[in-house]
Amino acid sequence: MTKEDLIKHLGTIADSGTSEFFKKFENSDTEGQNDLIGKFGVGFYSSFLVSEKVAVISKHNDDQQYIWTSDASSYTVVPDPSGNTLGRGTKIILFLREESREFLEVFKLDSMCRKFSQFLSFPIYLRDKKNVYDSDESENKEPRTEEYWKHVNTVKPLWQRKFVPHKLFKSE
């Protein structure tokens, strides 16, 4: 995104009704919060439900790299002092609230992505770890830990699948 895109699309939190949502969320009990979350949806601004601050680092081909940062009450957009580290694209960093630390667990993220994002048309990957055994015949049989990107939303939505006509199925 360009600087203008960051301001136009992310910087409208105060005008979008989102700030009102957060006021209601903070002033409600746990049951009321769950009800509000259900009504609110899973959009970008819901990241503030678990984060005290959100940073969006973005590089567009026609602009320099910028960092948009917000605490849900105000925001800033500044040129990235590190320069062009992305090449092109966007990176989102959530600064989690203490009570939201459970979302750092890969298992929790994996299960939530599979439950709520399984049919999204763009891929979601999670950084995970696996044990890898070397194939050589050395005496060292200890596995080494290797990080990899795991694709978690692999099921295509029904409207994107190819279907076999009903008459081709065999009846029993």
Image: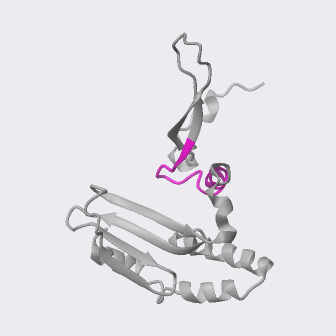
Which quadrant of the figure contains the C terminus? top right
Q: Is residue 125 magenta?
A: yes
Q: Is residue 71 magenta?
A: no
x 50%, y 39%: residue: 148
The residue sitting at the top extreme is 137
Q: Position of residue 155 (x, y in %)?
A: 58, 43
Q: Position of residue 162 (x, y in %)?
A: 52, 38
Residue 152 sits in quarter: top right
Relative height, residue 61 to residue 50 (above, below): above
Q: What span is colored magenta in the figure?
A: 109-128
Most foreground residue, 139 or 4? 139
Q: Can I make out residue 75 in this image?
A: yes
Relative height, residue 75 to residue 129 (above, below): below
Most foreground residue, 147 or 157? 147
Whether residue 108 sits left or right of residue 79 in the image: it is: right
x 41%, y 61%: residue: 91
Relative height, residue 153 to residue 25 (above, below): above
Relative height, residue 166 to residue 111 (above, below): above
Whether residue 75 sits left or right of residue 132 in the image: it is: left
Q: Can I make out residue 154 in this image?
A: no
Q: Position of residue 59 (x, y in %)?
A: 29, 63
The residue sitting at the front extreme is 139
x 62%, y 24%: residue: 142
Residue 128 sits in quarter: top right
